Image: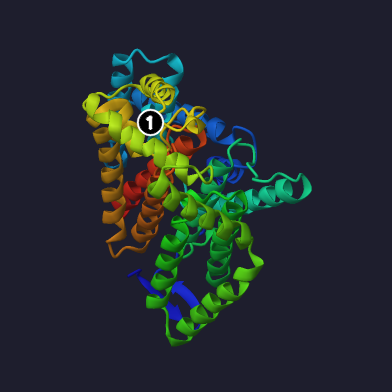
């Protein structure tokens, strides 16, 4: 339980948090997160810029003959990121994959540079919450603009994919909610607490408008986690306020764009049942995925250790379609729309193991921080766990890390939060 004390209705820390440190790098961090979904290629540009900044600090350390690895190497987590990139790159070389297939590993290769940029740049964690809050708000307004004024059926922001846009808007809102007890600029704690929940609702709304239903499992996970945690920490009057807030959210549900969401879930349910019963496609979302997953599980045993390669999967798919073993409606698809299964079939057990190891170690680092009694560690741990959980959930129905926006945001957030955890632990220690 968070090390919090309640004074009346105001939630307060037992120790007063210092004001946020306004620096050029902190402002750049906030703007990068805020613009990540609202400006073209902002996530790529910001990721590359932080890597360049990290390179500057690396050269500075070398010139000053300081240790390159200490004291902030993010608990050596970036080694596992680089191991994932190294193993998968090696398997891709084994399959003679084209150059374009190696692009996805770039953010994992430059993970140590991101760590140095965050550590030596003295990043203030509260600018992360502020940036994610602004990013969720801007994404929601952009989704409304494209939906209402431009008539786009499924808004996609500047990313090109409504699923990627909606999922990441939800992620940004969830990260803002994780930092609800850590207000920037010494803002009144109740005000920031309310704004953090509002940011989460903006992210949820953007996700609902884009109809990216594959990520909606994250909504109850984060919402229940936050409300239960707040309820446990609250005084009697605080618990009453939380109950009223939860009731207000329930009353607001009819005003959210839920009709389309319910229709999408209903259609996917019918499509799933029909596919299992007859093997036919009644809709274009769940059934094709089930067809792809069944295909992947069927062909994986043929090359279990190093897989078939990405092009090999597509070739096998076309062969099965030509032999009328697969529905021809999946011919335009080039991936299995399930990240762990894709890695298993594309790169075998070796590739999947490297992915699992990266996720497990990341989750362990953040869970360890969350289990501590220190308030900052708990906040950062929760933000990290939300990031890892979101990426895992998104990857169950989509090719999460194969998409540029997803991998850039995931790698940057994990490295940033992990570095801040190690830095805070060393400072406290």
Whole-percent x and y of residue 87? 27, 25
Residue situated furthest right in the rendering:
149
* Residue at 39% in and 59% down: 379
Q: Quadrant of residue 230?
A: bottom left
- Which quadrant of the figure contains the N terminus? bottom left
Q: Is residue 209 left or right of residue 347?
A: right
* Residue at 43% in and 79% down: 6
Colour convention: rainbow
User: Is residue 16 placed above or below 94 in the rendered structure?
Assistant: below
User: Is residue 219 placed above or below 76 in the rendered structure?
Assistant: below
Whole-percent x and y of residue 88? 31, 25
Q: Is residue 301 left or right of residue 251?
A: left
Which of these two is toward me, 93 or 117? 93
User: Is residue 341 placed above or below 264 in the rendered structure?
Assistant: above
Can see residue 126?
Answer: no
Q: Dot 1, crowdedness within 10 Å: few (<14), some or many (≥20)?
A: many
Whole-percent x and y of residue 291? 41, 38
Q: How many marks?
A: 1
* Residue at 54% in and 78% down: 247
Provide the secondary structure element on which disc 1 rests: helix
């Amino acid at each position: 339980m968070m090390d919090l004390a309640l004074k009346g209705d105001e939630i307060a820390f037992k120790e007063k948090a210092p004001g946020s440190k306004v620096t050029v790098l902190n402002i750049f961090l906030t703007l990068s997160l805020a613009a990540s979904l609202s400006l073209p290629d902002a996530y790529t540009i910001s990721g590359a810029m932080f890597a360049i900044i990290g390179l500057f600090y690396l050269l500075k350390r070398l010139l000053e003959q300081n240790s390159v690895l200490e004291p902030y190497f993010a608990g050596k987590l970036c080694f596992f990121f680089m191991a994932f990139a190294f193993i998968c790159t090696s398997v891709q070389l084994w399959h003679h994959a084209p150059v374009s297939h190696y692009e996805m590993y770039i953010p994992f290769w430059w993970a140590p540079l991101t760590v140095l940029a965050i550590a030596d740049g003295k990043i203030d964690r509260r600018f992360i919450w502020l940036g994610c809050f602004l990013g969720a708000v801007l994404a929601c307004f952009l989704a409304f603009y494209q939906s209402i004024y431009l008539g786009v059926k499924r808004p996609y922001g500047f990313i090109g994919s409504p699923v990627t846009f909606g999922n990441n808007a939800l992620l940004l809102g969830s990260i803002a909610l994780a930092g609800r007890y850590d207000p920037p600029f010494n803002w009144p704690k109740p005000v920031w607490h309310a704004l953090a929940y509002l940011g989460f609702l903006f992210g949820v709304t953007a996700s609902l408008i884009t109809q990216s239903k594959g990520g909606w499992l994250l909504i109850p996970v984060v919402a229940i986690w936050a409300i239960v945690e707040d309820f446990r920490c609250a005084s009697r009057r605080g618990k009453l306020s939380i109950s009223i807030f939860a009731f207000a959210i329930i009353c607001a549900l009819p005003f959210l764009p839920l009709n389309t969401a319910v229709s999408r879930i209903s259609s996917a349910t019918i499509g799933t049942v029909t596919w299992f019963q007859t093997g036919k496609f009644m809709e274009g979302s769940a059934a094709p995925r089930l067809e792809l997953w069944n295909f992947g599980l069927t062909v994986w045993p043929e090359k279990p250790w190093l897989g078939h390669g990405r092009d090999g999967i597509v070739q096998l798919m076309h062969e099965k379609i030509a032999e009328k073993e697969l529905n021809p409606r999946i011919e335009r698809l080039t991936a299995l729309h399930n990240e762990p299964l894709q890695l298993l079939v594309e790169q075998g057990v070796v590739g999947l193991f490297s992915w699992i190891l990266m996720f497990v170690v990341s989750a362990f680092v953040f869970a360890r921080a969350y289990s501590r009694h220190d308030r900052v560690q708990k906040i950062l741990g929760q933000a990290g766990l939300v990031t890892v959980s979101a990426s895992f959930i998104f990857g169950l129905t989509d090719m999460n890390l194969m998409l540029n926006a997803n991998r850039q945001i995931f790698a940057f957030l994990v490295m940033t939060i992990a570095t801040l955890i190690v830095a805070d632990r060393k400072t406290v220690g």
